Structures are given as structure tokens and as C-alpha cells.
Image: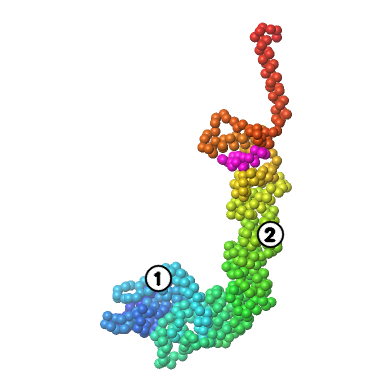
Amino acid sequence: MQRLDQIFYTWSERSLLGGKGMGPVASSLPVGALAGWDPVLRGRVWAGWQEHDRFGLGYLRGPDGYAVICKRPVTEAEGRQASLAHVLVGREITPLGALALHDWDGWLTAWDGTAELDPLSWEDLRRQCDLARRDLVGRARRLPAATLAELVAFVLAEPEADVSVVAPTESPAELLCALVEITGAMTFSTMESRDDDRGCPRVVFLPDDHDSRMGVPRRRFRFGSGGADPFALALATSYRAEGRAAIDRIRPQTPVTTADEARAWARAAQLAPGVLDDITGLLRRASDLSAAELGALRSKQGLAEARRIVPALEDGALAALLRASGLPEEVSALAQECALRSFLTGRAGEQVLAALAVRPPPARLIGEQLKHAPPLGRVAALARQALPDVRERRDLLDRAARQLSKSELIAWVHDHCRDEPEAAHVALRVICDGQERSAEQRRRALDTLIARGALAEATAELTPSPREAAAYLQSVLTVVAGARIDEPLMASFLARSHPPAHLLYALRAMAGDSRALALADRTAWGQFFTQSGLPAPLGAQPVASRAQPGPADERPAPRAERILLVVFFTSVVALLAVVAIVVTGGPL
């Protein structure tokens, strides 16, 4: 856990180190460690400007780590101009970590002479600093490319020199954030009144120009002076598009510290003046490329790199690539094919689907992807967005549906009849088209059909009338359950409470014997009264309509049943004869 020690500097009659004037008046460091830091900090804690609402943030290297200084001018009670400086020191403070503390609410802005300072833990500040860093980087990436390129070009012209930025047109913290992410770590100060004393950080910001009194060699820079070369502009443009990740892809292995190293980096990192050797970056900002950058994509090397990179792009970048116009045809076709495959396999989401609707792939290309057996839901979503021709769309859905078993199709139609009605209707027709080949597949299909309520809900959703829904149900039942349904199977289909009328109608038409038919009729009879809010009459039975007999009503009774009836009536007659003889006393 990283420890951060605190030091507070202001004017006093006697500091912790024994001196009078500007010095440390409170600290969490032992006196020996404080004495080691004081020579580094003493010259950097004075705020020499008059505007009390402005503060400066500095980042320095010291004897045992790094220091972050927040200093501001104050006026003492006696009218004397003074400064306050709150300092944090730690072993592993980075430049971006220091900049993330720019707006930290823990900086002390006054001193009553009594407060004690305790060590802090970086973990205590992490959440606030992480949020602040993300926000700062976001603002830095929104800086004008030309403004940022001017500063980058000036720094890279002599990387070993110290730089003073005079009257900056943008926030020093944001400029420093971008500069650090592009060119590397450096010490800095966002606000200094002068830069002509030794010990200044490498980059300082001055509110105004001034004459140097001490002859300290520093290069001074003003915005608007020109000098943004193509390489610096390309770096700034890539940084705005992707942030530090874009620079890291072309950054040299060792930090650039001399002008010769900066020129070598520029040569190695460019395919042409202003065109970075970064095909990934070009693809990620494909909608805003220059003619030279488009030429780099069209080159043999560019196309080879694109074939390697495009399949691995995340959804946002792939969708942007699909929407970009003016790209080489080979790149557009590659993006389309990769997006199609990525969506159908489930790796890509709605962003890519919406982009495929903007640049719809041909039906032939979509059909080729069916060999990978994509989920029917994905095919349905893609067909709905990308294929305006109804015949092409339904043909594709039919081909995709035929890759599934009847059991899978029954489950899919039941689950998606509302959100994908067209695909569900096509799948329903496929279910009706022939039986499964193996007994095991037929058993699974039957189990799924029973579990899904015989698709009664789906057929009602997908058809315009109960008559058509019943017709579809009869077709499904015929394929899955067979031409006739016996009583146990009828009971399975009717096990759910309140089966709908079109299901009862279809089941009654397929009853295989009188018992199955009677079960269907009893269910319909009971449900008629139940739906009216009445109990079914005790002992009442439905009377079959003579005007419109059902298919089962027209069938003769089975032969075995007729024989039993004849035997029964003959036995009854014989018994009555015997009783009559006994009663009359006739001969036996």
C-alpha cells in the first residue's frame, strides 16, 4: 500500500527545521526525511502571482520519490504577500497521478497554526483520483488537434530542452495530460510567475512573458507561432481518436530524449508524411481519413494488415468501419463479411446489426454463413434488418430453420412467436413439413410439443383466425403425434387448465377412439360453463350435434364392442326365462 506523506509550507517565525520565513510548519515526515526534501521543495513553493483565485500544481522528483505541490498566494493579516503550499510526497506518484490531484478536495487552503498532518494512503484517494484522471484524459482528447500538434512539435524538436509555455490558450492540466501521454513522463508546473531560476521543472506554464535575469537556458513557446509538422499533427489526430493506446502502438521502445531520436521515431512511425504506420488506427477512424491515409489502406501492406486486424475489432470500431464511406472496396467487403460472421456467431451485438442495416450484405453472403449453423434468432434479426425483399428473407429463414430439429423448432416458435413473428411463421411451416427420421427425435419432438402446450399460444399469435390456427395445429399434431391420438396422449395435451378452443377443436378432430373423443368433449363441455362463470352440471354429458357431426362421431363402434353387446343382451334374456319358470313352477 503506497504511503503519501504531507508537508505544509507557509511563512512563520520558526519552521519545523528552525528557519524563519517560508518553510515547513507541519509534516507527517520525520524531521530527518523532511530535511532531505526541503532543499528540493523550498524553491518551488512560492506563488509569485497576485490573483488569489488561481493556484499552481507542480510535479517534482526528490531524494526519495516524487512530490506534488499545490501552491497559492495569500495576504497575511499584516498586509504582507505570502504563499501557502500543500505538498504530498510518495515513492510511486506518476505524472498522470499528480495531474489527477489537480482538483482534489483535500488540498489545504488556509493555516491556523494548530493542525497536525498524518500520512495518507493512495488507496484512500484512488477512487476520486481514478475518476478525475478519466475525466482529465477525456478533456485532453478533446483539445484542438492543431493546438496540441503545435506543442508536441515544439517539444519533439529538442526533447532534451526545458520548455516554458507562455499564455496558454487551453487549460495547462489538459495540455500537460496530452503531452505526457504522447511524449512521455516529465516534471511540470501548471503555474509559475517566473522560469529563470534553477530547479524549475522541465515544462512550466507562465501567465505572461518576462525577461530572464539569471540566464537559465529554457525554450519559450507561444501558441499560434506555427511549426506543427505532419508527424506531430498525425500524433495529435490519433491521440484525439483513441487516446494513449494509439500512441503506444507506434511508440519507440526507449523514451525519446534527443532531436536525433525524435527524427528517427518520425521516420520509423510514418508510411508517408502525416500517415502513421498504424493500420489499426486508420481503421478505427475510417470515416475521417485523408487521401494519403486511404492510399495507405489500399496498399498491399495495408490490405494485409487489415485482414489481420478487422476480425478482432470490437463492436464500436467494426460498426464505424461499416458506416464509413469512401474506403477501398476490399476493406469495405472485408468489414461486411467480418461483421456478418461476428453477429451471426453471437460475438457482436446491436451496434453491428444496426451498421449491417446501413450496409446490408447480399443474401448470397448471408446464406454462405449458414454452414456455421448460426442461431435462428440471429438469422431472423439480421434478415429483418438487412433483407428488404420478402422472398429472399423467407427463403433464408427457411434454410436456417431446416438446420434445426423439430424439437428445437417447436421450442423456438413457442418462445419467439411475438418478437420474431415472421421467422416463427416460417419455422411453423417447416415443422409441418414431414416427420423426424429417428424414433428418438420423434419422441423428443412430442415431449417438447406437450411441454409447450401443443403450440396453441403460438398458432393463435401467428394466424388471423381460430379456424386457421386449428388447421395449423392439426398439421403439427399429425407430424409430431401421428394421425390419431389415443386417450392417454389426449390427456397429456389437455393437462393444462383452460385449453383454448382451437386446440380442443384440433384434438377432437384427431381423436383415435371413443374414449379420447369423450375426453375432448368433456373438457370442452366443462370449459364452456367454466368460462361463463358457472360450474359444470353434475352428471350432465355433452350431446353431439347431429347437424355438424365431428369426425369421430361418424365412425361405427369397433367390432369387439358390438360382440360384447350381443352376448350381454342374450345373457339377460336367458336369465329372465329361468326366473319365469321358477316362479310358475314349470319344469326345469
Q: CA distance from mark 1 to mark 2?
A: 67 Å
Residue 259 screen position, x and y as percent: 55, 87
Q: Is residue 285 left or right of residue 59?
A: right
Residue 475 screen position, x and y as percent: 68, 45
Residue 541 screen position, x and y as percent: 59, 31
Q: Residue at x 43, y 69 (%)?
A: 128
Does residue 403 lie above or below 127 as drawn? Answer: above
Mark with earlier residue (1, 2) = 1
Farthest left residue? 78
Nearer-the-camera pick, 363 or 253: 363
Q: Which residues lie in the magenta part? A: 494-511
On residue 295, the disc is: none
**Quarter of the rendering containing residue 22:** bottom left
Q: Amino acid at mark 1?
A: Leu
Q: Amino acid at mark 2?
A: Glu
**Which residue is label 1 attached to?**
120
Q: Is 500 colored magenta in this rendering?
A: yes
Q: Is residue 105 visible?
A: yes
Nearer-the-camera pick, 468 or 334: 468
Q: Residue at x 67, y 78 (%)?
A: 299
**Which residue is label 2 attached to?**
392
The tally of labels here is: 2
Does residue 497 lie above or below 272 as drawn? Answer: above
Q: Residue at x 63, y 46 (%)?
A: 469
The C terminus appears in which quarter of the rendering?
top right
Q: Could you tell me which secondary element the residue under label 1 belongs to?
A: strand
Callout 2: 10 Å neighbours few (<14), some, many (20+)?
some
